[in-house]
Image (tube, helix red, strand yellow):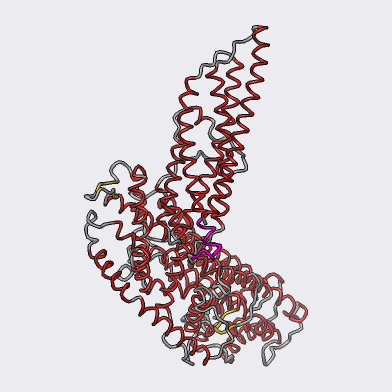
Amino acid sequence: MTKVLALFNCLYYLKFGSIGQKAANCKLSICCISIMVSNKVVSKKWISEETSDEEDLFNHCKEMELVCYAITKVILDADNKWKGITGKNTSPSLSNRKYIMELVNIQVLDQIIEYLAKLVKSYYKLNPKLARLKKDNGLLESKHDHIFDKMCSSRFIMLQTIRGLITTILNTCLHREDSRKMIESCLSLVTTYNYLLGLSYKRFTTKFNIGSNTYPNTVSETKPFTLTKVVQILSKSRVEINCQRLINCLVKVYKPEDISDNDSTTSTAESLEIYHTLTKHITPPTSSGPRDLTDEKRREAFIENKKAKMKHAQSLVEIKNEQNKMLSDIIGGQNSDGEVPYTSLLANEFTLENIFTNEDNVNSILQSEEMYIEILLDTVANMCPMLLGNSGVKKLKTGRLQASKKAAHKVTEYYQNILWGDVGSCLEHIVLWWSSCPLAIRSPNTCQNLREWLFSTFNVNNTPDLILSALRILADALGCHVTSSSWDRHFGATLTTNLKPTALKLYPGLSLYISESTESGANFALMLQELVTLNNQCEVTWEYILGAPIEDLPIVEQIPILHRLDHSIHTYRLWCLAETRRLANVWEMDDFFRIAHNDMQACMEQLINLRFADHTTTIESGKIGVHENVCAKMREKLVSEVKVNIQKLKEATEEITIVLASVCATTSLAHLTMIFPTNAEWRRVTRPQPSHSIYVHEFLDKMLLPVIKATQDVITLNMVLRIMCESWLHHIYVAKVKFSKEAALQLLADFNEVRNWLNDNILIATAARKQMLQNEVLR
């Protein structure tokens, strides 16, 4: 190991030695050129000579530029090597090549920090010299600007590589056993970065962002590395593992108690789908051994493994007792912020984590994460106290520095908020998309059941707020997925008209009064039912059923639901009007009334269940944030549009009736034109027939009988009967038929046959027949 480090040092110093030689050669060349130019200039007396101080300053700038590029190359190499480290613990053995390479990387990192500290001092020494430089002529000023631009460019590139190295190490340091050492190295780099960034010379600021336009980090001004940025990176590095731990907790709570029940319902089957998804496709495998082992071999292997663990535990029992005693002393004294010795807590960080992770509950997850923040705060307080601010550090009796209670609480709260917000987003992607058999490819009802289970199981009384916020993000994401996927499926089914009758017993809970509808009508009703349910769920929160504050409502998730609801109602109304007009024109009364009555009734039953809370007073008070105000106003606009479309849908029934009446009159006249006797036939009537004319039953069978078969609505039947009789009289008037006395008696008998036909028709209900016989056109 010593040889490896010695070899690295030799190579490293040789690299800088070659750079120094190049700088010396460059200096010699510049001196020669300056002498030649100086002789020529003196002879011509065009400009004054460079002073020795100016010459040394320019040469020093060039050397600094070369050193910056050399260190940048080393930093980039180190960054690439650290990116290849997964963060998993490796066995500390000299025969382990990976372990040795990590030691080398740590040694290189320490040397980088050392050289960067020296480089910062050189920059700060160079800064006042550049500021005091007198530029008496244009050539000297141009030379100064050229060298200075190149130095600024190299400095800028070096700063970007330092920032990248800091980010890389922070992303992996909390997954290592030497996490404290890595945090200390990162804080040293952060200090160097901020010092190098904080040069007071104004020219460094104006020429700072010199770089490629294709490099995203140069688009915005580079800012100092603050504790906020460090906490952000550390929290994001812990998202995946905490997401896994939270899923394990969910699986334990969600696990069905009896999965062998043969009488399981559809809901139970979907619950099992969710459970299998959470366990089989998300949690890591519990064994990496071969899968073709028999049960007997697995049992034997399990027993042998248990015996080995028991022997190992027995050998460590004394050490464990000492650790437990020390740990109880630590945990028992955490009531006072100033009495807790950070060194003892940090020395036992992994013992703490093992104890916390043994309890698979959400409280243990939160406590184990606070441990990492305590490590960070202790390191920052003693290495970079300026990151915590003027009042963020206080001195203990032992002489060590410690973060104040206010600063520690603020940093911990910020870390946990970022961490669990990202965990919620990560949970969404894992559950829906990232597993081998995700919920996104299954029925939306599966996601809806999981969402409802989250609402019913976790609340403020049994779940910490941070975990509850992550579960809320997951539940809201599931709601958005259910909204889009279920609406796409239902709306796609309605694009093709299918008037095949379907029994609504296949869709329980869809209607209380209708037992049959068209296939398309059932699809529309299902779509509206789904949207209404999702909208009503957005009107309640985890704490409130009624009267929830507008800030707590998921308005962002409700807006797309209202958009789809508004579009669906509008589309159904247009489809209903167009389809009933088409069916009326061909006088298909079965499908006509199945759409106009049954489908319309089923859809209206869904819309009756809509719930909209009125937040006008809260919006007008102006006591909510800008984002909430914009979303609330958008919601109010969509709610008003939905209500307008519902009203238009109610009025569509009257419009359909008007269309039916118009088509009935036209069709009746058309039939009478073809079947009503001509003037000549009426003139040939010499005496009334013993029975009615043939055209009467034909007219009634063509027009009235399909309506009677399709509906028992008395108002509609009376309207059709009245229009038929009026069209009958209108046809006689238009045709200008002249009746003799015998022909008039025959026409009267034909009119009386309508009453007889109604009495003889067994399809008409008694109450409907009674009212139809009282129609004024039959009197």
Quadrant occupied by the C terminus: bottom right
Q: Is residue 540 left or right of residue 719?
A: left
Task: Look at the image and tell me whether residue 710 can be seen.
Answer: yes
Q: Is residue 29 above or below residue 690?
A: above
Residue at position x 71%, y 87% in the image: 694
Q: Could one spot residue 600 in this view of the protein? A: no
Q: Nearer the viewer, residue 561 or 48?
A: 48
Left or right of 657, for residue 360: left
Q: Residue furthest front?
A: 3
Horizontal and vertical percent for residue 520?
Answer: 60, 75
Within the image, what quadrant is residue 535 found in? bottom left
- Report how many numbered discs are placed on residues in the image: 0
Residue at the spot x=76%, y=81% of the render? 681
Residue 10's place in the image compared with 744, above or below, is: above
Expressed as whole percent of the image width and height from the top left, the position of residue 92 reads 48, 64
The image quarter containing residue 587 is bottom right
Where residue 159 appears, as percent x and y from the top left, is 52, 40
Q: Position of residue 686 (x, y in %)?
A: 73, 86
Instruction: Name above or below for residue 51 compared with residue 742.
Output: above
Magenta segment: 93-103
> Does the magenta portion include 95?
yes
User: Magenta residues: mostly which secondary structure?
Assistant: helix
318 part of magenta stretch:
no
Q: Residue at x 59, y 92 (%)?
A: 760
